[in-house]
Image (cartoon, rainbow, N blue to C red):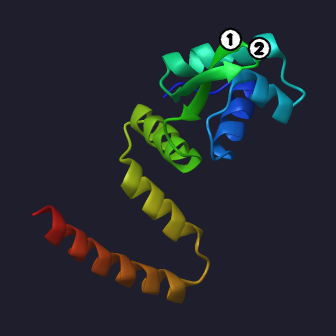
Amino acid sequence: MQRLTKAQRKIMDILWNTEKPLSYSEICDINSELNVNTVQAELRRLLKFEYIKVGEIGYSGTVLCRSYLPTMTAEEFQTRCYIDEMEKLNKRPAVELVCGLLGAEKSKKQRLKDVAELEKMLEEYKKEIK
């Protein structure tokens, strides 16, 4: 996964928080800090990385323009970034995440409960993938 620049992150946040496809001008209307030229350039990059896609082509006044949609949710994007970073370190993402979260729990009693619940969930998961 390609890391997002600040401008790309602002654009993606707008797209993630909107229900409909947006044109570059609508994105600029939502966040006036964004420059039209910057938004157009970053949309091209985001298309190249396949983080967005053309949702529809329509008219803005008398000019044809494209509107864009994200290809993944914000949560999916964060998960992919996490997995990529862990793989770069030759770590197993799921195992490291679960162990890290368990280690963050202060109460030993709660950790034991969490481990027992995870064991049940893993047994169910094993049945599903066999």
What residue do we see at 38% from left, 54% from top?
94
Residue extending farthest right = 32
Q: How many marks?
A: 2
Q: Amino acid at mark 2?
A: Thr
Q: Nearer the viewer, residue 105 or 8?
A: 8
Mark 2 and mark 1 residues within 8 Å of each other at the beta carbon: yes
What residue do we see at 66% from left, 34% from top?
12
Q: Quadrant of the C terminus?
A: bottom left
Residue 40 pos. (x, y %): 70, 14
Q: Secondary structure at mark 1?
A: helix
- Mark pair 2, 1: CA separation: 5 Å
Which mark identifies residue 130? none
Could you classify mark 1 by the number of other residues whose Cα lies within 10 Å: few (under 14), some (14-19), or many (20 or more)? Answer: few
Quarter of image, res 63 = top right
Residue 105 pos. (x, y %): 58, 74
Q: Secondary structure at mark 2?
A: helix
Is 37 situated above or below 117?
above
Q: Is residue 48 left or right of residue 21?
A: left
Is 110 situated above or below 59?
below
Q: Nearer the viewer, residue 36 or 124?
A: 36
Is 101 situated above or below 84?
below
Could you classify mark 2 by the number of other residues whose Cα lies within 10 Å: few (under 14), some (14-19), or many (20 or more)? Answer: some
What residue do we see at 22% from left, 75% from top?
123
What residue do we see at 77% from left, 14% from top?
38
Q: Amino acid at mark 1?
A: Ala
Q: Label 2: which residue?
A: 38
Q: Nearer the viewer, residue 42 or 66?
A: 66
Residue 80 pos. (x, y %): 46, 40
Q: Label 1: which residue?
A: 41
